[in-house]
Structure formats: structure tokens, C-alpha cells
Image (cartoon, helix red, strand yellow):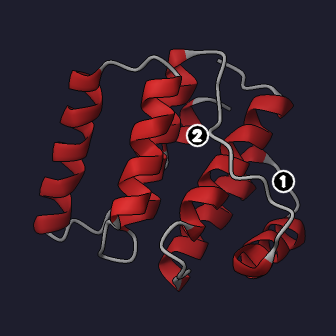
Amino acid sequence: MKISLVERSKYFKGLLLLLGKDNKITEDETDLLLKVCDTMGFDKSFCRNAIRTLLENEYIIDDIPVFSEDEIVKSFLKDGFNIAYADNDLDSRELKFLSDVAKLNGIDDEWFNNLYEQHLNNFREKNKEVGLEVVNLI
């Protein structure tokens, strides 16, 4: 599947919003989001600037991304959990955002809960190998 520029933009913006939910941005989270940007072909300086100014940028609209395909939503949610767990803590605001994305995009609760449990188990086991799902969409 080739993901359109519009969908890539929503994907990046949604992950950027997720990054700011706990009001802290770690180096590991930044590194993962920059990998997403690189994979999607976005300008790294633009992405770095967006991340650097995220917490004080009053013009970012905090809306839930809606995607055209279930495959894109599921990829987004998997990458979202990877980024949310990158700081070794899943904040309740991050979990709510991911849950809202799933609901608004019609993702089954059981599928979402299984994904959450899988990431929770990986976190407990300190599994640091994180692959990005977005590579499957490009």
C-alpha cells in the first residue's frame, strides 16, 4: 500500500500530538519520531523544529487523526504505542489519545486491547528493539 501525502501528514501530526500528551519529550521519543519522518520523506529540519517547539506551540490543533484505511490506523496505533513507551512510561493521556484514535477510526476494542497488552508485556520485559510499522505503508 502506498500512503498518500495527506495520510502521511496526518500520521506525523497525530504522532506529534501524542508526543506532547505527557508534557515531556525525551530523546528516545524524538529519535523514533524522526525515524518516522525520515521514512515518510519529510524534511528533517522541519520535523526537528516541530518537535522542539511542540510544547509551546499554541497554534497546533489537538484533533484526532482520521485515516482512510484500517491498515493505516493500525500501523499508526502500533507506532504510537512504541513512541509512547519510549520514555519507559505510558501516561494516561497518551493511552486515552490512542484509544480515541482507535474508536474514532472504527478499530475493534478487542484488537486495541490486545495491542495494548502486547506493548505492556514488551515494556515489562524491557524489550528495547522497536521497529516502525510505517515502513510497511511506504
Q: Position of residue 42 (x, y in %)?
A: 84, 53
Residue 130 seen in render: no
* Foreground of the two, 92 or 90: 92
Q: Place residue 102 in its image quadrant.
A: top left
Q: Is residue 29 left or right of residue 44?
A: left
* Foreground of the two, 52 or 126: 52
* Foreground of the two, 55 or 135: 55
Q: Are marks 2 and 1 in contact (CB under 8 Å)?
A: no
Q: Position of residue 107 (x, y in %)?
A: 40, 20
Report the amino acid beneath label 1. Phe
Q: Residue at x 88, y 61 (%)?
A: 43
Q: Position of residue 19 (x, y in %)?
A: 56, 66
Q: Earlier in the sequence, mark 2 or mark 1?
A: 1
Q: Place residue 78 in its image quadrant.
A: top left
Q: State the residue position of label 2.
A: 135
Which image quarter holds the C terminus?
Answer: top right
Q: Position of residue 23 (x, y in %)?
A: 54, 78
Q: Is residue 115 left or right of residue 21?
A: left
Q: Place residue 124 in its image quadrant.
A: bottom left
Position of residue 4 relative to residue 22, above or below, is above
| Secondary-structure class at tag 1 | loop
Report the amino acid beneath label 2. Val
Q: State the residue position of label 1.
A: 42
